[in-house]
Amino acid sequence: MKEIVVSGIRPTGHLHLGNYFGAVQNFGLMQDEYDCFFFIADWHSLTTHPRPENIQGNAHTILAEYLACGIDPDKAVIYIQSDVPEITELYLYLNMLAQLGELERVASFKDKVRLHPDNVNVGLLTYPTLMAADVLIHKATKVPVGKDQEQNMEMIRRYARHFNHLYNVDLFPEPESFHPEGPMRKVPGLNGSGKMGKSEGNAIYLSDDEKTIRKKVMKAVTDAGPTIPNSPKPEPIANLFALMELVSDPSTLDYFDNLYKCCEIRYGDMKKQLTDDINRFCTPIRERIHHILADIPYLKGVAKRGAEHARQSAIGTLNEVRQTIGFPCR
């Protein structure tokens, strides 16, 4: 029997290169080895975007981008979170196990309170229990997450242990943080420091057109250039080389690396080459995104089929939970 993997992404923006190389490229590999549940976390997005412009449209856009990146709905279950109402019932039960003090100490909650003091809502506080419901509803054994989610993962395991101990059952496995064997790269942004991300405004999106990509790359932060042969690269320049390593031929990377070591590099030439290579990488994905978005019946069919499979799994788990607690099964 295959192990179960669950992973989700918020529909608050397009997928970017950081998403792709950080996790999404591995989903196509995981779906051949594990029973995978990939979901669009539209409920989660309400914690920080309570009035989204078009939440359903955003969800369908992210769904199309997932599919364009290689998710096969015949191999993996891919669905929109809000299409599986059983998650909210499990979320309720888990909130009965959660302790207020523990939730208030969650690092991501404290960060959000500091950044958005005018929007400290209960949904934001109980984000870890909703995340736990997403994972435990399918009895997942693995969750591909970054280091910033380790605290939430430990809380999920704690809720699973607490439920099992409280009711003297062995219903929920304790899922482990999963780092697939495929490459997972930290993709730098274009603003000279940090990683690529939506909130940082330094991302290249998979759906960006060629003109947009060119404009973004040409504005990337650089310096006056090296003056001492073989000198170390400062962070903004190292970031450009890191991007080139992801999308360019090794010979291209070596060529510009040698120019840098010899103090002969021209950043304008490097940026033009990087632009061409990023466009060559993104173009087929972008074309698949547009093709899928244009086929609304197909997209809705994938979402409906995914929800049906996800609900089948969720209803089975929830009936076990209800029976364990003492409520009638549905």
Image: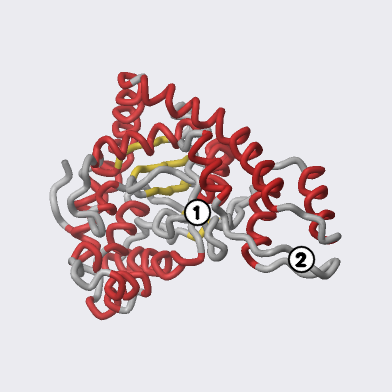
Image quadrant where one finds the C terminus? top left
For disc 2, the neighbor class at 10 Å (few under 14, some 14 to 19, many from 20) is some
State the image coordinates of residue 149 (x, y, percent, origin top left).
Answer: 44, 64
Q: Is residue 167 left or right of residue 291?
A: left
Helix, strand or loop at label 1? It is strand
- Res. 144 mark: 1
As drawn, 304 above or below 314: above
Residue at the location (26% across, 59% down)? 48
Residue at the location (53% across, 34% down)? 210
Q: In this view, does 29 lie to the left or right of 75?
A: right
Q: Nearer the viewer, residue 159 or 88?
A: 88
Q: Earlier in the sequence, mark 1 or mark 2?
A: 1
Identify which amino acid the numbered label 2 is placed on.
Pro
Q: Is residue 321 left or right of residue 14?
A: left
Mark 1 or mark 2, whichever is nearer to me: 2
Query: Distance of mark 1 from mark 2, alpha carbons?
Result: 39 Å
Identify which amino acid the numbered label 1 is placed on.
Pro
Q: Tell me the residue that label 2 is attached to.
A: 226
Q: Which of 244 and 148 is in front in this view?
A: 244
